[in-house]
Structures are given as C-alpha cells and as structure tokens.
C-alpha cells in the first residue's frame, strides 16, 4: 500500500467517516456557531442538510464529540429501510435494552416509555441529552412524529436536543403542509456546502498532515485541480486523492502534481466523477507549470510550502519575526488543521519566556487533535512546568492532559489530573463524571484502560506549584 511508500501512519483519504481528519472551512465554522447558538437557546430540533458526500456524517460525529462534555450524547448512525418505528435505534444509541423480560423485542410503545424514563433519569441528574440522527432523509412521517413526541419532555428546561442530518430533499419534505407541526419545532436550518477552492487545498493538506505526512506530497496546483474535478465535495476529493497516491506510489513519485493527477485519471483510476476523455482535454491547461515546480523545489530544499492564498510562515531561525507573530501564525495553521506546520511555529514562539506556557499548551493541543497523544502529554508537561501558569491555566492544561492520558490508557495519571482539577474547581466541565468512570474501571471514551505504574511525576509537579 502507498502508506509505506509515503511514510504515512494511515490512509489520509479513507472514505470512512473520520472526525480526526475533519477539516472545517470558514462556512463550516459558521455552521457550527449556528448549532452552538441553537443549543444555547435550547432549541428542540437542528437540521443539517446537504448533497451526498459533503461530509454531513463526519460533521455530525464531530458535533456529538464536541458537546460530549456538556451533554449526554447519543448517535443514531443510520435508519434501516422497512422500520416503522425509530425507537429501537434510539434505545440502542442510549445503550438501553431493546428486549422485554420475555426475550421478545419491546413494542414501539414499550420502547417509547423506556426512552422517556431514561430522559427523566438523566434530567434528575442535572444532565441534558443530545441525540444526533444521521441519514435523516430516511425518517418516515411516523418516525418524525415519535421524535416530536419525545421533544415534549422539554418543559421550562430543555431535557433533550436533536440534531438531524440528511440529504437536501429532507428540508423540502419538512416544508410540506402535513409536516408543519414538526417543522415548527425546527429552529436552526443549515446547509452543509461543498468546499471552496481555498478550503479544498487546506482539506487535502490537513488530511495528509493528520496521517503523518512529513511534507505536503500533493502540490497546491494539484489540489486546485482536484477542486476543479470534484466541485469541492469531500467524498470525491477522497476518491481522487486516494487514487492519485496509489498511482504515485506505483510509479515511485515523490510528488503528486497536476500532471500526475491527470495521468491517474487517464488510466481510468478514480474516474467516478470524470471521464478519461475529459481528463485528456484538461491536460493542455493544467500540465507542466513553473509555479508548481518552484513549490516542489522549495519543499525539497527544506522550506515550508504554503497555499498561495496565504503568506508563507516564518522559517525556523528567522529572528526577524517576533515570537508573538509566530504564535498567531501557529494559531491560524492549527485552525486550518495544519498541525505539523502549527507546531513548528509554536516551538519558535516558545523561545520567548512570556509565551512559553501558551505555546507548549498549543503544541499539546495540536498533537492531541492529530491523535499523537504521547507527544501531546510531553508538551502539556512542559506547559505545566512553567512557573508562570495561573491556577486557571493549570486547570485548563490538566484537563486536556487528562484526556490524552485517558486515550493512552494511563488510568492512574488521568485520575490524578482530574482529582487535582476537582479540588480546585469542583464543577469544571465533566471531571466528576470522568473520575467516576475511571474509578469504576473504564474510561469515559469507552476504551479499556491500564493502571500506570507510577504517576508521582504529576503529583510532584503540582505540589511544587502549590495548585
């Protein structure tokens, strides 16, 4: 496989939903702000629609993960054809039994009662529920009515929120007269759009970086051609990127250029959205570009390669660039999902004692977002070692440190971090729930955890800071 040839940790353009590889463009950030506003206003239903392949599933999973600290989240990943009730899927999403004491499947009414009892228990514990439903275009009118009736559990204080993601025709269905009773409870309607050309470039770079690429591999010109071919639809971008990397590895090519991408198409690979004849017609305008050659030469000489829409980041060792500017550039790169480049900038910024704490914390966050939790822990330890950290900053860093330790299965150390947080800030985020989950022998993420042989480094560090 091409992962070995390009020294990647995994396939960057897998067609399976991958929240870790999710790239959010400017429009997507606006969409998430609308979702957040809807949840703050305790709206009943939030509806996200879009054409197939625009990333609705990955976005829905990202929403469920993002709000896991504030809500008890559950996901219905798909709607089976032929079902006359959604309740069995809701029970499964909540981890509730879907059978009665006689071993038979619970009736729709029994399932509904079981779900409402679960809502009441969760509410009595001071928690709210976020139920995310994918493939919502397959919801029948009776299923939508069941969800509407569940929303009746919301009184003065909301108990359950719904985020429904479906194809474009789902929004049209909800606007029919017979659906008015349900539609009146939908207070946020958003469309998940394809990526712009600029965001397509960043999307490709982000997916490669998250997979461990040490240089961009795909030129900016090739990224822009991918956008031209796919219209910015992430699923089609993944098709094109995967096929091009396979072609490049087979021909032992260091770079995927626009020319290589066209050769891939001409040979009939990844052409579900482009005919071979069309690929040949594009060759005259997309092949052999001087700017593209210059980009590759820069990267091969150890210089950072950036999309032309942005200024190139400062190079390591360039003392003319202030540390504060490096830090800001690091923030921008992190927000774009370019974690490796962001880490380079934060490391330079960390040379300034006044920025060392924040820079190391940001490095840790970059590694955490990239799934490189061992390196995240190292960076968070450096941030905590700073004598300049305030109690508030220490608590914030300890929390993300604990999350990375959990991901690594280092139970004792994660518990130690959360217990220090609880002592200083008893109701900080979800630390109480995480302490309970870890103490019962399982992590909050659902992964099995092991006991660390020695977590004294964390206790010693915190005692020295007198948190």
Image (tube, rainbow, N blue to C red):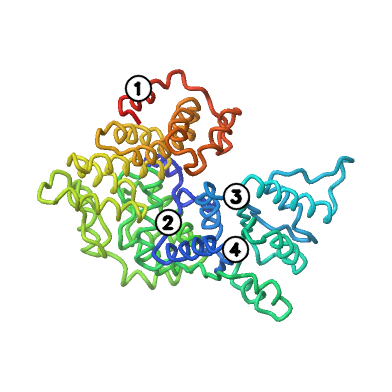
Q: Name the residue under label 4.
A: 165
Q: Where is residue 79 in the image (x, y as percent from the top left)?
A: 70, 58
SS at mark 3? Answer: strand
Q: Which mark is residue 73?
A: 3
Q: For mark 1, does the 10 Å Cα neighbourhood hold few (<14), some (14 to 19), or many (20 or more) residues?
A: few
Label 3 or label 4, whichever comes before in sequence order: 3
Label 1 or label 3, whichever comes before in sequence order: 3
Q: Residue furthest top?
A: 453
Label pair 2/1, CB-CB below 8 angstroms: no
| Residue under the image location 52 percent in, 60 percent down | 40
Q: For mark 4, does the 10 Å Cα neighbourhood hold few (<14), some (14 to 19), or many (20 or more) residues?
A: many
Label 4 or label 2, whichever comes before in sequence order: 2
Q: How far apart are marks 4 and 1 (CA)?
A: 47 Å
Label 2 or label 1, whichever comes before in sequence order: 2
Q: Mark 2 points at which residue?
A: 23
Q: Mark 1 points at which residue?
A: 460
Q: Where is residue 252 in the image (x, y as percent from the top left)?
A: 35, 46
Image quarter (top left, top right, bottom left or bottom right) of the C terminus: top left
Label pair 4/1, CB-CB below 8 angstroms: no
Q: Where is residue 350 in the image (x, y as percent from the top left)?
A: 22, 41
């Amino acid at each position: 496989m091409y992962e070995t040839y390009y020294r990647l940790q995994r396939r960057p353009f897998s067609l399976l939903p991958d929240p870790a590889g999710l790239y959010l463009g400017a429009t997507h950030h606006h969409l998430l702000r609308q979702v957040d506003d809807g949840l703050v206003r305790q709206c009943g239903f939030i509806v996200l629609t879009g054409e197939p392949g625009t990333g609705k599933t990955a976005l829905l999973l990202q929403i469920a993960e993002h709000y896991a600290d504030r809500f008890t989240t559950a996901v219905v990943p798909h709607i089976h054809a032929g079902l006359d009730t959604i309740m069995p899927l809701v029970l499964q999403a909540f981890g509730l039994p879907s059978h009665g004491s006689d071993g038979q499947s619970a009736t729709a009414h029994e399932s509904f009662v079981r779900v409402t009892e679960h809502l009441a228990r969760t509410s009595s514990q001071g928690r709210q529920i976020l139920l995310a439903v994918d493939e919502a275009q397959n919801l029948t009118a009776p299923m939508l009515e069941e969800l509407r009736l569940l929303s009746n559990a919301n009184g003065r204080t909301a108990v359950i929120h719904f985020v429904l993601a479906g194809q474009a025709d789902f929004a049209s269905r909800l606007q029919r007269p017979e659906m008015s009773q349900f539609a009146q409870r939908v207070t946020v309607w958003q469309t998940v759009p394809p990526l712009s050309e600029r965001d397509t470039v960043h999307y490709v770079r982000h997916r490669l970086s998250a997979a461990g690429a040490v240089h961009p591999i795909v030129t900016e010109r090739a990224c822009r051609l991918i956008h031209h071919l796919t219209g910015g639809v992430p699923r089609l971008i993944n098709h094109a990127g995967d096929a091009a990397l396979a072609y490049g590895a087979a021909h032992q090519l260091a770079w995927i250029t626009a020319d290589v991408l066209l050769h891939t198409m001409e040979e009939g690979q990844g052409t579900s959205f482009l005919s071979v004849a069309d690929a040949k017609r594009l060759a005259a305008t997309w092949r052999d570009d001087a700017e593209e050659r210059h980009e590759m030469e820069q990267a091969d000489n150890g210089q950072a390669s950036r999309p032309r829409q942005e200024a190139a980041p400062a190079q390591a060792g360039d003392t003319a660039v202030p540390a504060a500017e490096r830090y800001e550039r690091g923030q921008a790169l992190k927000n774009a999902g370019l974690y490796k480049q962001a880490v380079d900038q934060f490391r330079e910024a960390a040379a300034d004692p006044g920025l060392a704490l924040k820079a190391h914390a940001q490095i840790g966050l970059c590694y955490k977002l990239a799934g490189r939790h061992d390196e995240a822990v190292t960076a968070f330890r450096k941030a905590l070692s700073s004598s300049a950290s305030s109690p508030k900053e220490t608590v914030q860093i300890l929390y993300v440190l604990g999350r990375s330790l959990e991901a690594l299965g280092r139970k004792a150390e994660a518990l130690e971090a959360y217990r220090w947080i609880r002592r200083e800030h008893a109701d900080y985020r979800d630390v109480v729930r995480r302490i309970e989950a870890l103490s019962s022998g399982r992590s909050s993420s659902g992964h099995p955890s092991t006991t660390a042989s020695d977590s004294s480094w964390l206790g010693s560090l915190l005692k020295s800071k007198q948190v």
